[in-house]
Amino acid sequence: MPATLGGPWPQRARYPKAKTVHKARRHPAVETAMQAGRLATRSMGVASAPLRPDPDFLLIGAKRGGTTSAYFHILSHPDVLPLFPSAKLLPKGRDTKGTSFFTTNYHLGSIWYASHFPSRLQRAVHQRRAGHAGVAGEASPYYLFHPLSAQRVHDLLPDTKLLIALRDPVDRTHSAWREQTRNGVEKLGFEDALDAEEARLAGEAERLVREPDYISFAHEFQSYAHQSRYAASLARWFALFPRENIHVWASEDYYAGANETVQGITAFLGLDPSRLPTIEQRLNAAPKTEMDPATRERLRVFFADDVAETERLLGRTLPWSNFH
């Protein structure tokens, strides 16, 4: 583990080449006050970190696989505890989803990580009120693809439960490109971005392994097709964690029957699925655009071998009609 920090933690410039999406500007005094509040809140969490147990689960991917909706759907179960600070302490009343600790924030240390989870007191209060224990976890979907995160998680949380959503790789690839286009980061058209991917990613995974503090924008955000090849990523996690600690579902099953899918997830987490409220809202969804049929076929061929290997690893057929 990296050396732990006591804060405050100045945010290092992660991706200097990325274009910042324009947002409504706040008055500098307001921004300063908000930053001070965030630092004070995190300092409070760090001070009490020894009293904050490890998370019970991690939702590790895949990006653009419905992980935001799924996480907050899981969080709606009355026995799932929010991260610290909870929505009650946040200006917009929105709970935190993830920490990106095992990828881009690993340098901040395990005490910083522990500061995000509910305390033993919170857990005890919940157990006294509910009559049974609650659980807590985070969702950081880049974990699945990052070459070091599986080992990092295993080093710190060898018994944690892992949740994985896998989306049709053709649709996931297009969705990831659309997201970066909306964010003002990606200037290339879809086909040109696919053609540029090999050059953009050349040596990046190797450098992430060679230089543990290195952060790669291209590897995280412009690996449109490569991040949709799931087999190698799954194999890393399967090699370190027992299969009974890993729950995988198809994003398409969640989109078609969200409540049934999350009932299965909560049962896997040891919770009573009948206590899950019905939710229909899908979060972080993006407007769809059409893909050229020739490009879709090109991607289908590119992913065919990986889909076959992914299904072999999982021991089941996935509901992706492009490949069957």
Image (tube, rainbow, N blue to C red):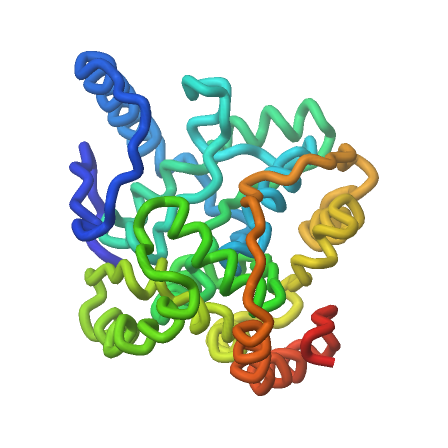
Report the quarter where the C terminus lies: bottom right
Instruction: Identify whether 222 is placed above or below 261.
Output: below
**Image quadrant of residue 245?**
bottom right
- The image position of residue 108, as x and y in percent, is 24, 47
- The image position of residue 121, as x and y in percent, is 51, 27
Look at 50% across and 64% down and name the residue there. Answer: 173
Look at 45% across and 37% down and name the residue there. Answer: 117
- The image position of residue 229, as x and y in percent, is 50, 75
**Image quadrant of residue 279?**
top right
Instruction: Identify whether 121 is placed above or below 70.
Output: above
Instruction: Identify whether 288 is placed above or below 241.
Output: above
Question: Camera-side residue: 61 or 252?
Answer: 252
Report the quarter where the N terminus lies: bottom left
Question: Camera-side residue: 16 or 162?
Answer: 16
Extreme residue toward the right, this view: 274
Q: Is residue 3 left or right of residue 42?
A: left
- How many circles with numbers are drawn on the protein? 0
Instruction: Identify whether 312 is placed above or below 186.
Output: below
Question: Camera-side residue: 27 or 82?
Answer: 27
Look at 36% across and 69% down and name the residue there. Answer: 192
Quick check: can you spot residue 320? Answer: yes
Quick check: can you spot residue 134? Answer: no
- The image position of residue 125, as x and y in percent, is 59, 24
Q: Is residue 16 left or right of residue 157?
A: left
Look at 76% across and 33% down and name the residue there. Answer: 277
Question: Camera-side residue: 147 or 240?
Answer: 147
